[in-house]
């Protein structure tokens, strides 16, 4: 079996494992979200969302170093030099420990001042909010220290371990829901403490697993001036992009709190919860492919890398779209069944956030590709600057034009579309790929599918009375419409032939 065939087989196996994990996590996540919302109440749910999310704004630091860690670990693994891998891992762990200390200092000074003076929190809930804030800092520090170990598991493509640990994590969160209901104390404080305990558990398990299975993790803390400089240089240039991501997630969350209060934060929190579940459908697919993108570049196999980029971009979008279309149509009914309580604006937030999620899914393979090259200065300077504009534009519109909160997410979508065009123009020449090929094989099929496939589901939605039976009918029509559209207008001829051959092989095996 050729290396390419082995890699494809590994990708397929890892994708299936991650999807099995995702389905399990999805059920638990949807259930726990409902119970937590009803147990905490809309106001406390919104407070938790904005306060814990605020410390998450410092994630632009961890996100930058996390991207650098993943790139350097995966690249060294592609080359296969163990002494280099050990040196890299030791330096990366040292860097993340230093970052955790920096987060603690910033959180207890500037961050604490902002929470006390700028966020809209009812006076009678300020004590609980401060408990949430402190444990959010500790949880965030632990997640930072775990980054090198998570990156190592993914680089080695050990998705089975990643899936099992995540499942245990989800079961513990299910236990939190039970304890939250039975413990007779302030529910918001209890939730923050129990969530922190899970972070401690995750940190220990990831560390033990990596130490037992990956030789490069059996090393001491290290400091190599040259390597530190390389990693920090990479991280600094990715910081602009990660700061932008924090801006259009947690930054928007803070803006909504400042102008509309915690009730709107609760609406966004619910919408993001659904978005996270849906996004996992393409995240798992991308997680299985991303290490191969970096390894292909490290081995100078640009043709294979280009093919992976096109496949990952296009089918990541389609995986999200096939779920998002019926969910956007039936959002009111789904949210009513799921939550019972639907905070105002939640339906519109969900529909808009799902649109932006599909655009982000399309961009992720390009970002992984440019990280693989290491040539990120120009890309990060331009991409990050464009995405950073989302927050100031939204602030001006909220401050001076008194817009509805939904328009904040519209700003994100418009800027994301413009940024995607710039990504393509900058990144593809770096991997010797023609932009016209990307537009023909990725963008054009996507445009065809999203224009044609919603027609029948929209007709059914507007002309059929809402009920349980018609809900499933509309979902069925949406899924079939997208599947047919993807096959005829989304796939290239070679891809359709591949699908047909795979189906024939499965049928032959069963009949044989």
Image (cartoon, grey):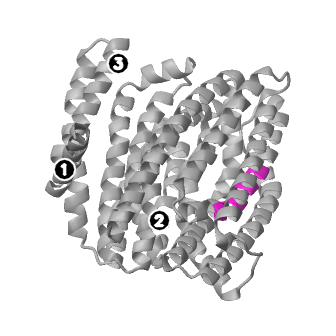
Q: Position of residue 396 (x, y in %)?
A: 52, 50
User: Is 351 above or below relative to 430?
Assistant: above
- Quadrant position of residue 259: top right
Q: How many marks?
A: 3
Q: Main secondary structure of the magenta part?
A: helix
Q: Position of residue 17 (x, y in %)?
A: 48, 47
Which residue does the image show at 35% across and 55% down from the upper left?
417
Which residue does the image show at 25% across and 56% down from the upper left?
443
Q: CA distance from mark 1 to mark 3?
A: 34 Å
Q: Which type of secondary structure does the marked residue at label 2 adopt?
A: helix
Left or right: 344, with 107 as reference point: left
* Pointer 1 with pointer 3, Cβ within 8 A: no
Bin the neighbour count of mark 1 within 10 Å (Cα to Cα): few under 14, some 14-19, many 20 and up: few
Q: Is residue 99 in sight in this rendering?
A: yes
Q: Which residues are magenta?
A: 137-149
Q: Is residue 363 in sight in this rendering?
A: no
Closer to the observer: label 1 or label 3? Answer: 1
61 and 156: which is toward the camera = 156
Which residue does the image show at 29% across and 22% down from the upper left?
474
* Pointer 3 with pointer 2, Cβ within 8 A: no
User: Is 44 above or below relative to 131?
Assistant: above
Which label is found at residue 471? 3
Q: Is residue 142 magenta?
A: yes
Q: Which of pointers 2 and 1 lies earlier in the amino acid sequence?
A: 2
Q: Which of pointers 3 and 2 lies earlier in the amino acid sequence?
A: 2
Bin the neighbour count of mark 2 within 10 Å (Cα to Cα): few under 14, some 14-19, many 20 and up: many
Q: Is residue 359 magenta?
A: no
Q: Which of pointers 1 and 3 lies earlier in the amino acid sequence?
A: 3
Q: Which type of secondary structure does the marked residue at label 3 adopt?
A: helix
Residue occupied by mark 1: 501
Q: Position of residue 456 (x, y in %)?
A: 20, 28
- Quadrant position of residue 507: top left
């Amino acid at each position: 079996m050729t290396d390419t065939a082995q890699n494809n087989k590994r990708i397929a196996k890892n994708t299936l494992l991650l999807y099995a994990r995702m389905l399990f996590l999805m059920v638990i996540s949807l259930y726990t979200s409902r119970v937590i919302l009803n147990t905490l109440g809309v106001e406390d749910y919104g407070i938790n969302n904005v306060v814990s999310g605020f410390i998450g704004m410092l994630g632009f630091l961890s996100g930058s170093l996390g991207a650098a860690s993943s790139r350097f670990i995966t690249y060294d693994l592609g080359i296969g030099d163990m002494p280099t891998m050990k040196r890299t891992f030791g330096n990366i762990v040292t860097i993340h420990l230093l970052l955790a200390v920096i987060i603690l200092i910033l959180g207890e000074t500037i961050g604490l001042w902002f929470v006390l003076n700028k966020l809209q929190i009812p006076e009678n809930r300020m004590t609980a909010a401060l408990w949430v804030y402190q444990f959010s800092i500790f949880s965030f520090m632990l997640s930072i220290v775990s980054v090198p170990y998570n990156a190592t598991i993914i680089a080695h493509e050990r998705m089975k371990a990643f899936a099992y640990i995540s499942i245990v994590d989800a079961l513990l969160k299910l236990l939190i829901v039970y304890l939250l209901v039975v413990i007779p104390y302030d529910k918001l404080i209890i939730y923050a403490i129990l969530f922190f305990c899970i972070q401690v558990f995750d940190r220990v398990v990831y560390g033990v697993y990596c130490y037992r299975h990956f030789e490069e993790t059996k090393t001491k803390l290290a400091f190599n001036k040259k390597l530190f400089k390389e990693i920090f240089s990479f991280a600094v240039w990715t910081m602009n992009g990660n700061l932008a991501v924090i801006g259009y997630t947690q930054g928007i969350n803070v803006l909504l709190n400042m102008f509309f209060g915690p009730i709107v934060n609760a609406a966004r929190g619910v919408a993001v919860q659904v978005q996270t579940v849906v996004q996992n459908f393409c995240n798992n697919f991308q997680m299985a492919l991303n290490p191969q993108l970096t390894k292909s570049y490290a081995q100078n196999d640009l043709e294979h890398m280009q093919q992976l980029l096109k496949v990952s971009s296009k089918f990541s979008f389609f995986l999200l779209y096939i779920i998002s279309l019926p969910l956007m149509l039936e959002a009111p009914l789904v949210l009513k069944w799921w939550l019972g309580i639907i905070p105002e604006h939640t339906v519109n937030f969900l529909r808009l956030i799902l649109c932006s999620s599909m655009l982000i899914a399309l961009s992720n393979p390009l970002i992984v590709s440019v990280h693989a090259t290491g040539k990120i200065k120009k890309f990060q300077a331009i991409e990050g600057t464009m995405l950073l504009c989302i927050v100031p534009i939204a602030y001006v519109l909220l401050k001076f034009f008194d817009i509805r909160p939904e328009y904040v997410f519209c700003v994100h979508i418009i800027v994301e579309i413009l940024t995607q065009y710039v990504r393509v123009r900058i990144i593809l020449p770096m991997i010797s790929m023609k932009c016209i090929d990307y537009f023909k094989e990725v963008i054009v099929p996507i445009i065809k599918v999203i224009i044609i496939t919603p027609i029948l589901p929209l007709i059914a939605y507007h002309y059929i009375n809402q009920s349980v039976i018609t809900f499933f009918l509309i979902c069925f029509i949406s899924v079939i419409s997208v599947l047919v559209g993807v096959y005829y207008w989304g796939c290239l001829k070679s891809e359709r032939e591949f699908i047909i051959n795979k189906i024939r092989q499965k049928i032959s095996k069963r009949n044989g």
